[in-house]
Amino acid sequence: LRTSGVRESKEARELREITLAENEWSRMQISPEQGAFLSMMVRLTGAKRIVEIGTFTGYSALWMAEALPEGGHIDACDISEEWTSFGRQYWKKAGVAGKIQTHIAPALETLNKWNNSPTPPVFDMAFIDADKENYEGYYEACLKLVRPGGLIAVDNVLWGGSVLDDEQDEPTAAIVKFNQNRTHDDRIHLAMTPIGDGLTLCIVK
Protein backbone atom coordinates (compact mmCIF):
# COMPACT_ATOMS: atom_id res chain seq x y z
CA LEU A 1 0.00 0.00 0.00
CA ARG A 2 2.70 2.50 0.97
CA THR A 3 4.70 1.89 -2.19
CA SER A 4 1.75 2.48 -4.51
CA GLY A 5 -0.76 4.61 -2.58
CA VAL A 6 1.29 7.01 -0.43
CA ARG A 7 3.67 9.70 -1.69
CA GLU A 8 5.76 10.29 1.42
CA SER A 9 8.49 12.89 1.00
CA LYS A 10 12.08 12.00 1.81
CA GLU A 11 12.00 14.35 4.81
CA ALA A 12 8.74 12.93 6.15
CA ARG A 13 10.06 9.38 5.82
CA GLU A 14 13.27 10.29 7.65
CA LEU A 15 11.34 11.99 10.45
CA ARG A 16 8.97 9.04 10.81
CA GLU A 17 11.74 6.47 10.88
CA ILE A 18 13.96 8.29 13.37
CA THR A 19 10.97 8.92 15.65
CA LEU A 20 10.12 5.22 15.56
CA ALA A 21 13.73 4.28 16.26
CA GLU A 22 14.56 6.78 19.00
CA ASN A 23 11.40 7.94 20.76
CA GLU A 24 9.77 5.70 23.36
CA TRP A 25 6.41 7.41 22.68
CA SER A 26 6.58 6.80 18.93
CA ARG A 27 3.19 5.08 18.99
CA MET A 28 1.72 8.59 19.19
CA GLN A 29 2.90 9.29 15.65
CA ILE A 30 0.30 9.03 12.88
CA SER A 31 0.79 6.55 10.06
CA PRO A 32 1.92 7.51 6.53
CA GLU A 33 -1.58 6.65 5.31
CA GLN A 34 -3.06 9.17 7.71
CA GLY A 35 -0.48 11.72 6.67
CA ALA A 36 -1.40 11.28 3.03
CA PHE A 37 -5.08 11.54 3.90
CA LEU A 38 -4.59 14.76 5.89
CA SER A 39 -2.56 16.15 3.02
CA MET A 40 -5.45 15.38 0.68
CA MET A 41 -7.91 17.05 3.06
CA VAL A 42 -5.78 20.21 3.06
CA ARG A 43 -5.90 20.29 -0.73
CA LEU A 44 -9.59 19.40 -1.02
CA THR A 45 -10.71 22.03 1.47
CA GLY A 46 -8.39 24.68 0.06
CA ALA A 47 -7.11 25.24 3.59
CA LYS A 48 -4.70 28.10 4.12
CA ARG A 49 -4.64 28.26 7.91
CA ILE A 50 -4.59 25.17 10.15
CA VAL A 51 -4.46 24.63 13.89
CA GLU A 52 -2.94 21.39 15.14
CA ILE A 53 -3.56 20.18 18.69
CA GLY A 54 -0.76 17.77 19.56
CA THR A 55 2.29 18.06 17.31
CA PHE A 56 4.69 15.53 18.91
CA THR A 57 7.79 15.36 16.66
CA GLY A 58 6.08 17.15 13.81
CA TYR A 59 5.29 14.39 11.32
CA SER A 60 1.63 15.30 10.76
CA ALA A 61 2.48 19.01 10.65
CA LEU A 62 5.05 18.27 7.97
CA TRP A 63 2.54 16.39 5.82
CA MET A 64 0.00 19.21 6.07
CA ALA A 65 2.55 21.99 5.55
CA GLU A 66 3.77 20.34 2.36
CA ALA A 67 0.19 20.48 1.04
CA LEU A 68 -0.44 24.11 1.98
CA PRO A 69 -0.32 26.75 -0.75
CA GLU A 70 2.15 29.63 -0.70
CA GLY A 71 1.30 31.82 2.27
CA GLY A 72 -0.35 28.94 4.14
CA HIS A 73 0.22 28.64 7.88
CA ILE A 74 -0.04 26.05 10.66
CA ASP A 75 -0.35 26.96 14.35
CA ALA A 76 1.06 23.86 16.05
CA CYS A 77 0.14 23.45 19.74
CA ASP A 78 2.10 21.14 22.03
CA ILE A 79 3.46 21.12 25.57
CA SER A 80 6.90 19.73 24.66
CA GLU A 81 9.63 22.03 23.37
CA GLU A 82 11.91 19.00 23.12
CA TRP A 83 9.66 17.04 20.77
CA THR A 84 8.67 19.95 18.54
CA SER A 85 12.30 21.11 18.33
CA PHE A 86 13.18 17.66 17.04
CA GLY A 87 10.72 18.09 14.20
CA ARG A 88 11.87 21.59 13.24
CA GLN A 89 15.05 20.34 11.60
CA TYR A 90 12.96 18.22 9.22
CA TRP A 91 10.51 21.05 8.56
CA LYS A 92 13.52 23.14 7.60
CA LYS A 93 14.98 20.41 5.37
CA ALA A 94 11.60 20.12 3.62
CA GLY A 95 11.44 23.89 3.10
CA VAL A 96 8.25 24.38 5.13
CA ALA A 97 9.57 25.67 8.47
CA GLY A 98 8.30 29.14 7.62
CA LYS A 99 4.75 27.77 7.39
CA ILE A 100 4.68 26.34 10.94
CA GLN A 101 4.56 28.29 14.20
CA THR A 102 4.72 26.33 17.44
CA HIS A 103 2.86 27.32 20.61
CA ILE A 104 4.43 25.60 23.63
CA ALA A 105 1.74 25.61 26.31
CA PRO A 106 -1.32 23.55 27.27
CA ALA A 107 -3.40 23.71 24.11
CA LEU A 108 -6.60 24.72 25.90
CA GLU A 109 -4.81 27.79 27.21
CA THR A 110 -3.77 28.77 23.69
CA LEU A 111 -7.20 28.06 22.22
CA ASN A 112 -9.04 29.95 24.96
CA LYS A 113 -6.68 32.90 24.61
CA TRP A 114 -7.54 33.09 20.91
CA ASN A 115 -11.26 32.70 21.53
CA ASN A 116 -11.22 35.45 24.17
CA SER A 117 -9.25 37.91 22.05
CA PRO A 118 -11.01 40.86 20.35
CA THR A 119 -10.13 39.45 16.92
CA PRO A 120 -9.88 35.63 17.13
CA PRO A 121 -8.02 33.90 14.30
CA VAL A 122 -10.14 32.06 11.75
CA PHE A 123 -8.96 28.61 10.71
CA ASP A 124 -9.87 26.52 7.68
CA MET A 125 -8.93 23.24 9.32
CA ALA A 126 -8.10 21.75 12.73
CA PHE A 127 -6.39 18.47 13.55
CA ILE A 128 -6.86 17.15 17.10
CA ASP A 129 -4.42 14.46 18.26
CA ALA A 130 -3.47 15.09 21.89
CA ASP A 131 -4.45 13.87 25.37
CA LYS A 132 -7.82 12.17 25.10
CA GLU A 133 -9.25 13.46 28.38
CA ASN A 134 -9.37 16.97 26.87
CA TYR A 135 -10.80 16.01 23.47
CA GLU A 136 -14.18 17.53 24.21
CA GLY A 137 -12.61 20.80 25.30
CA TYR A 138 -10.32 20.93 22.27
CA TYR A 139 -13.23 20.23 19.97
CA GLU A 140 -15.50 22.90 21.45
CA ALA A 141 -12.72 25.49 21.30
CA CYS A 142 -11.87 24.59 17.70
CA LEU A 143 -15.53 24.71 16.72
CA LYS A 144 -15.50 28.43 17.54
CA LEU A 145 -12.33 29.05 15.55
CA VAL A 146 -12.89 27.00 12.38
CA ARG A 147 -14.95 28.74 9.71
CA PRO A 148 -18.26 27.37 8.41
CA GLY A 149 -17.39 24.80 5.77
CA GLY A 150 -14.06 24.17 7.46
CA LEU A 151 -12.84 20.79 8.68
CA ILE A 152 -12.09 19.44 12.15
CA ALA A 153 -10.27 16.09 11.99
CA VAL A 154 -9.98 14.07 15.22
CA ASP A 155 -7.57 11.16 15.58
CA ASN A 156 -7.66 7.93 17.65
CA VAL A 157 -11.45 7.65 17.80
CA LEU A 158 -11.23 3.83 17.64
CA TRP A 159 -8.36 3.65 20.18
CA GLY A 160 -7.16 0.23 19.10
CA GLY A 161 -10.67 -1.15 19.43
CA SER A 162 -10.78 -0.53 23.19
CA VAL A 163 -13.77 1.79 22.76
CA LEU A 164 -15.79 -1.45 22.64
CA ASP A 165 -14.43 -2.84 25.91
CA ASP A 166 -16.75 -3.17 28.91
CA GLU A 167 -14.06 -1.88 31.28
CA GLN A 168 -12.41 1.35 30.19
CA ASP A 169 -9.65 3.54 31.55
CA GLU A 170 -10.01 7.31 31.63
CA PRO A 171 -8.62 8.07 28.14
CA THR A 172 -10.81 5.37 26.57
CA ALA A 173 -13.93 6.60 28.38
CA ALA A 174 -13.16 10.13 27.17
CA ILE A 175 -13.00 8.96 23.56
CA VAL A 176 -16.24 7.00 23.92
CA LYS A 177 -17.94 10.10 25.32
CA PHE A 178 -16.55 12.23 22.52
CA ASN A 179 -17.81 9.78 19.88
CA GLN A 180 -21.25 9.60 21.49
CA ASN A 181 -21.53 13.38 21.70
CA ARG A 182 -20.75 13.79 18.01
CA THR A 183 -23.51 11.39 16.97
CA HIS A 184 -26.22 13.99 17.61
CA ASP A 185 -24.15 17.15 17.17
CA ASP A 186 -26.18 19.14 14.65
CA ARG A 187 -23.49 21.82 14.34
CA ILE A 188 -21.47 19.60 12.02
CA HIS A 189 -21.60 17.09 9.19
CA LEU A 190 -19.98 13.89 10.46
CA ALA A 191 -18.04 10.92 9.10
CA MET A 192 -15.96 8.47 11.15
CA THR A 193 -13.36 6.70 9.01
CA PRO A 194 -11.29 3.58 9.87
CA ILE A 195 -8.03 5.18 8.75
CA GLY A 196 -5.13 4.48 11.10
CA ASP A 197 -6.54 4.34 14.61
CA GLY A 198 -9.82 5.92 13.50
CA LEU A 199 -10.23 9.46 12.17
CA THR A 200 -13.45 11.44 12.59
CA LEU A 201 -14.13 14.22 10.09
CA CYS A 202 -16.39 17.09 11.11
CA ILE A 203 -17.42 19.74 8.59
CA VAL A 204 -18.59 22.86 10.43
CA LYS A 205 -22.07 24.00 9.36
Image: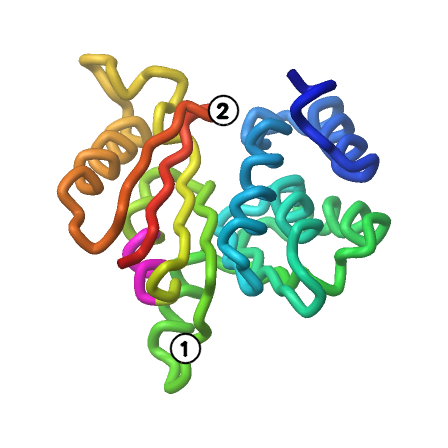
Q: Would residue 147 be found to the left or right of residue 14 on screen?
A: left
Q: Would residue 2 be found to the left or right of residue 121 on screen?
A: right
Label 2 packing within 10 angstroms: few (<14), some (14-19), many (20+): some
Return the residue at label 1.
120
Where residue 29 appears, x then y in whole percent?
59, 32
Where residue 199 appears, x then y in whole percent?
41, 33
Q: What amino acid type is highlighted by mark number 2?
A: Gly
> In the rendering, which numbered label is found on residue 2?
none
Vertical placement of 199 versus 138: above or below?
above
State which quarter of the image contains the N terminus.
Answer: top right
Which portion, as a residue range, is magenta? 139-144
Q: Farthest right residue?
A: 93
The quadrant holding residue 10 is top right
Magenta stretch: dominant secondary structure: helix
Q: Would residue 160 be found to the left or right of residue 186 on screen?
A: right
Where residue 62 appears, x then y in whole percent?
68, 46
Q: What residue sits 24% from the left and 34% below the top?
A: 179
* SS for callout 2: loop
Where residue 71 appears, x then y in whole percent?
68, 69
1 and 2 marks in contact (CB < 8 Å) = no
* SS for callout 1: loop
Front in this rendered view, residue 202 or 104:
202
Q: Would residue 37 be found to the left or right of residue 89 on screen?
A: left
Q: What residue sits 28% from the left and 21% below the top?
A: 163
Vertical placement of 181 versus 66: above or below?
above
The quadrant holding residue 101 is bottom right
Q: CA distance from mark 1 to mark 2?
A: 32 Å
Return the residue at label 2.
196
Vertical placement of 108 versus 62: above or below?
below
